[in-house]
Image: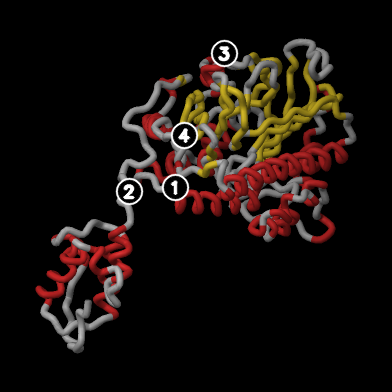
């Protein structure tokens, strides 16, 4: 069908709103229609062109071979997507622990996550607060699918605890020695890493996965540079005293008080880049309504899903290696003998059996707490942390909190907490702080004792850790 034979340079001044008035929906079709008008000057009036565009909208099959409107016709002939694609109209119930301590925004996010077609179960931990997609402190079980933002940006972020054969008395009066070793062996801050001879080596850098995915291969150098560093935000390395409340058979440590080292950090720039790449890819492949866009998922039957799964597990191994480097350096510096080391990760997805079927359990800021599994739940820089033993509670999908959880946003904390207030709290609890911004002030966090009281059905406490010297990013910067 021939539509144009002459050229008239007079502008038609047709806008997107004009196309909406004749029946076009917001989306790619409007862009293609405007592009056709811009690239093909018409010898028709504005009304005639709008009439022609209306014909294309009503009968796109008649214009599939048209030299001007073929692309528009192809777009209009594509199957229309349901705006609620991927979301069920209602969600199943899920268990909430410490509901009176959890903000509405986190609850709303969990409600949406429970409406995904791949969701088979969920739970909200007592430290939960609003995040991106799945709330921090959210646990979601999915069927044969993984949600990159359900894992989180800092893939494999974890806790690591080293307990030494040094009694509490070996620390008292020698704090300066422990502080110097802590500063010498750690590096903090977004984007920070090591150079030259400072760099550590670890077998994780030789894993074949680095060469199996082209995208990941390009990140190996960054991983090498940042190995053994801790980033920013709420990441820390700290000295403290751990009190074993009972003779512990799992760790072979008698009841008593010992010097201990506790760290919290993840997969650094490597993991953050992996998360950003596959989240973008998931959004391109999985079209969800606006309120659920950050819950875009990848099927584990797809090449993209398998790629992410491999990259996620590599990032988790890398995060563990970072903690090993940090703890080994500091252990060497103080000369103490290691009695036991316990670590657990959050911001991860696991294949687990739950309610009789294999599911993908996303724990975004939640600690694995299956039967007899050991884990660490920290407080704040002045509040105690706890070494716990999981009870394997099915209602929580074998999970517990990963910390105290924020009660103030970073922005709110910076605006409302003063340096003097922060100094007074540190002095009151006899804590030496190196670095950290006001966004990490103890007052920005929930009461860890209230959080622990809300999850007595999930874990048993076997030891209590009291912070003494805390090292964080100098500027309180967030992870890169």
Q: Which mark is residue 331?
A: none
Q: Which mark is residue 118?
A: 4
The disc, 2 or 4, on the residue closer to the chain's N-terminal end is: 2
Task: Report which residue position mark 2 lands on.
Answer: 81
Q: Is residue 70 above or below residue 11?
A: above
Residue 99 horizontal side relative to residue 226, left or right = left
The disc, 4 or 3, on the residue closer to the chain's N-terminal end is: 4
Can residue 137 be seen at all in this image of the molecule? no
Q: Which mark is residue 456?
A: 3
Q: Nearer the viewer, residue 233 or 145?
A: 145
Task: Report which residue position mark 1 lands on.
Answer: 286
Can residue 127 be seen at all in this image of the molecule? yes
Residue 184 horizontal side relative to residue 236, left or right = right
The percent coordinates of residue 361 (x first, y second) are 56, 30
Q: Is residue 178 above or below residue 120?
A: below
The alpha-carbon separation of the residues under discs 3 and 1 comes to 38 Å
The disc, 3 or 2, on the residue closer to the chain's N-terminal end is: 2
- Callout 1: SS: loop
The alpha-carbon separation of the residues under discs 3 and 2 comes to 46 Å
The percent coordinates of residue 405 (x first, y second) are 52, 30
The residue at the point 67 percent across, 19 percent down is 388
Front of the two marks 3 and 1: 1
The residue at the point 63 percent across, 39 percent down is 157
């Amino acid at each position: 069908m021939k539509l144009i034979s002459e050229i008239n340079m007079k502008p038609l001044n047709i806008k997107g709103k004009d196309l909406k008035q004749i029946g076009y929906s917001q989306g790619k079709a409007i862009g293609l229609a405007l592009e056709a008008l811009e690239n093909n000057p018409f010898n028709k009036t504005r009304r005639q062109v709008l009439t022609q565009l209306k014909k294309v909208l009503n009968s796109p099959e008649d214009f599939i071979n048209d030299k001007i409107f073929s692309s528009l016709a192809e777009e209009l002939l594509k199957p229309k997507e349901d705006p609620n694609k991927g979301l069920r109209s209602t969600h199943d119930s899920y268990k909430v622990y410490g509901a009176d301590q959890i903000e509405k925004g986190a609850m709303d996010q969990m409600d949406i996550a429970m409406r995904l077609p791949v969701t088979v179960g969920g739970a909200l931990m007592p430290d939960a607060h609003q995040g991106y997609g799945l709330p921090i402190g959210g646990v979601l079980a999915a069927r044969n699918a993984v949600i990159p933002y359900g894992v989180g940006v800092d893939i494999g972020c974890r806790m690591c605890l080293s307990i030494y054969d040094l009694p509490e008395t070996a620390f008292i009066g020698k704090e300066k020695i422990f502080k110097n070793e802590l500063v010498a062996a750690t590096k903090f801050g977004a984007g920070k890493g090591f150079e030259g001879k400072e760099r550590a080596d670890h077998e994780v850098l030789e894993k074949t996965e680095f060469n199996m995915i082209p995208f990941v291969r390009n990140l190996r150098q960054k991983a090498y540079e940042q190995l053994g560093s801790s980033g920013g935000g709420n990441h820390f390395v700290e000295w403290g005293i751990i009190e074993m409340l009972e003779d512990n058979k799992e760790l072979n440590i008698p009841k008593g008080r010992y010097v201990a080292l506790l760290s919290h950090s993840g997969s650094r720039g490597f993991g953050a880049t992996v998360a950003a790449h596959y989240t973008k890819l998931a959004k391109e492949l999985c079209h969800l309504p606006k309120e659920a866009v950050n819950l875009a998922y990848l099927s584990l039957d797809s090449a993209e899903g398998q790629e992410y799964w491999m990259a996620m597990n590599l990032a988790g191994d890398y995060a563990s290696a970072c903690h090993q480097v940090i703890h080994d350096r500091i252990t060497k510096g103080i000369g103490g003998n290691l009695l036991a080391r316990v670590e657990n990760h959050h911001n991860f997805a696991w294949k687990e059996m739950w309610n009789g079927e294999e599911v993908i359990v996303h724990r975004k800021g939640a600690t694995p707490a299956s039967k007899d599994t050991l884990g660490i739940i920290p407080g704040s820089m002045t509040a105690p942390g706890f070494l716990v033993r999981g009870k394997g509670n099915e209602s929580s999908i074998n999970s517990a909190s990963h910390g105290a959880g924020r009660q103030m946003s970073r922005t709110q904390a910076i605006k409302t907490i003063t340096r003097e207030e922060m100094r007074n709290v540190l002095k009151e609890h006899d804590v030496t702080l190196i670095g950290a911004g006001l966004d990490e002030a103890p007052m920005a966090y929930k009461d860890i004792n209230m959080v622990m009281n809300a999850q007595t059905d999930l874990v048993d406490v076997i030891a209590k850790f009291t912070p003494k010297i805390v090292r964080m990013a100098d500027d309180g910067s967030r992870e890169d």
